[in-house]
Amino acid sequence: MSLLHNLTSGLRSLFRKEQENRELEEELNGFLEMAAQEKMNRGMNREDALRAVRLERGSLGVTKEIVHAARWESFLEACWQDVRFGVRMLRKGPGFTAVVVLMLALGIGANTAIFSLMNAVMLQSIPVPNPEQLMVLRWSAHNRPQSIGHSSYGDCRSTNWATTYASSCSFSYPMLKEIREHSTVFSGIAAFAGPAQLDLSGNGPASMVSGEIVSGDFFQTLGVGATSGRTLDLNDEKPGAEAVAVLSYAYWQTTYGGSAAVIGKTIKLNGVPFTIVGVADPRFTRLTPGKSQDLWAALSQVAALRIPWGGGNLNKSDRWWLTVVGRIAPGISPTQAQTATSLLFRDEIVHESLLKTADEPQVALLPAQKGLSGLRSWAEEPLILLMGAVAILLLISCANVAGLLLSRAETRRKEIAVRLSLGAGRARIARQLLTESLLLSFAGAAVGIFIAFLGANALAAFVVANHNSALTLNATPDLTVLLFTVGVAAVTGILFGLVPALSGTRANLAPVLKENATSMTSAVARGRRRVGPGGALVVVQVALSMIVLAGAGLVVRSLANLKGINPGFDTSNLLQFGIDPALTGSYKEAEVQNLYGELQRRLTHLPSVMGVSYSSDVLLNGGLWTSDVKIEGRADKSEVEIQMLAVGSDFFSAMRIPVVAGRALTPADMASAHEVAMVNRAFVKRFIENREPLGLHFGGYGPKDTLYEIVGVVGDTKYDDLRKEPEPTAYIPVKKGGVSFAVRTVSNAEALVPAVRRALSDLDSNLPMFDVHTQNERIERMLFTERLIAYLASVFGVVALILACIGLYGLLSYEVARRTKEIGVRTALGAQKRDVLRLVVAQGLTLVAIGIGFGVVGTFGVTRFLKSLLYGVEPTDAYALLAVCALLLLVGGVACLIPARHATRVVPMVALRYE
């Protein structure tokens, strides 16, 4: 009665408001006619009279605006009534509301979490004023510039350095000065390179910091100020200028505790005294996504820091190593700026005879937000795939909730029929049901924001922990994320609410109002009827779940295959760290070998150490050194490309790489003038051509190029990538430069880190160790993308499977409750429990089987996008699909059994009296 009273009151209020609006419109129209009639009595015709009234009293449009305003007010009031009524209805079913909100929170929260990570990596604007004015310069030409050195640091995507076409964001310092001095289209122009790993001393124990080398106008061009002290300026870029550094805010806080006394303090970078002159604005965390620095130093200090990028001389026009950004001047369009810059670039590069006019050298200006790719270059694909996975998860949640709302709408058939009989329009009823759907959706979004906050920060921490360099990610939901969540909530509410709303308004009034509870005839008739929209939604859930589970299964199998690869050496219990004596400036080249030998001896005597050696790079760390060489005695005299690695004595025994012929490198080889090398089996198989490899030579073409004598052959190993097959590789003695030590232990290599630090500090306290990791940690980082997708896809797959089972269980439970009389009649007529069990289970498994069929088709179309992430498994792998099908049938069968068992317990006499 209370419900009918509320419905009647609401309808009367609505009808009263509509009547008032009609009366208002009639009154205004009457006023218009009366005013026009007065003027007609004065001799004016009707058209002139109406036109005069409009001029005096306002146009007819104003009158209509008043009426429309009244109608809009009535509409808002009706919507508010819908909201209040929807809240009351949802409060009456707290269990139903809680389940729906939780399911929606999972779907919306997962989408918001992944979008938060995508926003942090790909969408967040560069933290500088007016970033849309900032352009990155990228040149291209139809030929490769001759005789120039080229460096790239991951700032720009798709750098091309082919023979017939070249394109890059790297420029020389003379080119920077040319653009700065002669261009009028930029209000500021700046350059940067790196970051470089610098040896920091003068602040406690020696450590490594990440320092970016920038032009003097770097901060002025970006519009970034200092929170303490000052930033760099053009005077700091002049030759002979005092060595100064600007700290990042984060490094200032963590290392110096935010003390203002740090301004003016002297530190040593690579043995060179630097004065700290300022701390950058805390909002400036990076320019290129994924590249965060501890400090900035001016270009004038490149030679003093012994950084090889500029070749020791900034004014060399054949060294291209700077990324250049410019801020477009007011009143200048990007097209004008690009044309003027291209002209300057072409004239200068042709004048230097690096390219010809026919090569069409030109410069493109790209918005810095797009042009500086950095972390986006490898994160884009996995993030898009994860967004697709969570979108499917949200669709499953929507289908699940839609099924529950359909069941709920069925129980409200009489209520809806009464409202329709009292004069409410079907559109009005549909709007009420959609309002309830939107209320559920926004409630789920509110809970989902909390889930997203936790999930996004956990994902950001995972990315930071597995990144090779310092990285700052702010994955906290911001306005962009909140707007995304609101949009998803609105679309979701309409998506899962539309079908129940349309279904609920199709009620046939007469049968529903005449229905006394449920007649046996109608019950049996409905029992014979197909499941309808609810069954279709279950099919959709099963199909979508299969797509997510199949994708997760493929990526997990691929990850297992990658982890099961034999890299050619023993990766267990292997601690690795880097040192570079050249950075301190206190070691001569001849002294470096003595340092390495002494450190190797000291580490060998530590407890639980089984072997120690060193190399110029670490295997399976992503680094790769290649060289073009000629090989003695080959029929083909052309150069071939091989991989190279400089190693110390005992390297092969420490890494457990088998020596299959000849001898290993010895300590004497490290200092000998006679150059020797070892090669792997792949080298022998491809280039030696059935000859005896020992004693052969390889090297460069020039008379001054080093020739190496092959003294041994070792087994094949993976070098830079687990996915690649072993390539021809040569191992030569370490003669100079920084190295990475490898310490083989009996167990738990990480426990040895303090002892290794003490041994190095006792040898030289100013020599820092860096990049300290075990070999297994490096492999885990290398497989970061596969691990991230495999873990998250597995979680999403399990959640999708659970949601699909809940949907199937809910549908069958509702069907059993709806068909209680029918089941009672069947039982009374002699049906056995197994017959009833078979009836319900068959209905559920039929839906599962249909969903699997559609899911297989969808899987073939979707999993092909995973091809670049797979290893040792095809996107259409039959075993993975069969396993997922079996899992869905098994879990679906379990979900069917519970309502089926309830159906077998129906007592005929109770069922026949069922209301």
Image: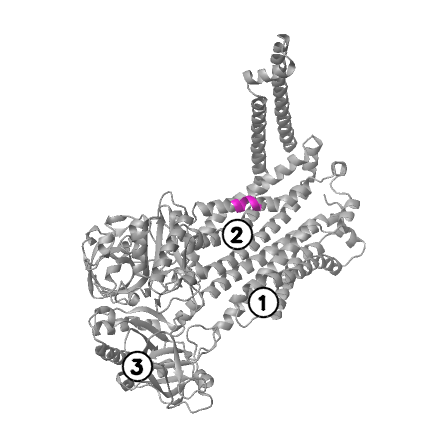
Observer-nearest of 801 and 175 = 175
Main SS category, magenta section: helix
Note whether 318 is above or below 177 in the view shown. Answer: below
Q: Secondary structure at mark 3?
A: loop
Residue 623, quarter of picture: bottom left
Q: Please, what is the three-letter code of the amino acid marked with disc 1?
A: Pro
Q: Are marks 1 and 2 in contact (CB under 8 Å)?
A: no
Q: Position of residue 199 (x, y in %)?
A: 25, 65
Nearest to viewer (mark 3 / mark 2):
3
> Which of the labelled discs sits on residue 875, or is there none?
1
Task: State which mark lies toward you, 3 or 1.
Answer: 3
Neighbours of disc 2 within 10 Å: few (<14), some (14-19), many (20+): many
Q: Is residue 113 above or below residue 890?
A: above
> Alpha-carbon neighbours of circle 3 within 10 Å: few (<14), some, or many (≥20)?
few
The residues bearing labels 3 and 1 have C-alpha atoms spaced at a distance of 52 Å
Classify mark 1: residues with Cα within 10 Å, few (<14), some (14-19) or many (20+).
many
What is the number of the mark on residue 704?
A: 3
Q: Which residues are magenta?
A: 487-492
Q: Which residue is mark 2?
A: 106
The residues bearing labels 1 and 2 have C-alpha atoms spaced at a distance of: 28 Å
* Label 2: element kind: helix
Q: Is residue 693 above or below residue 820?
A: below
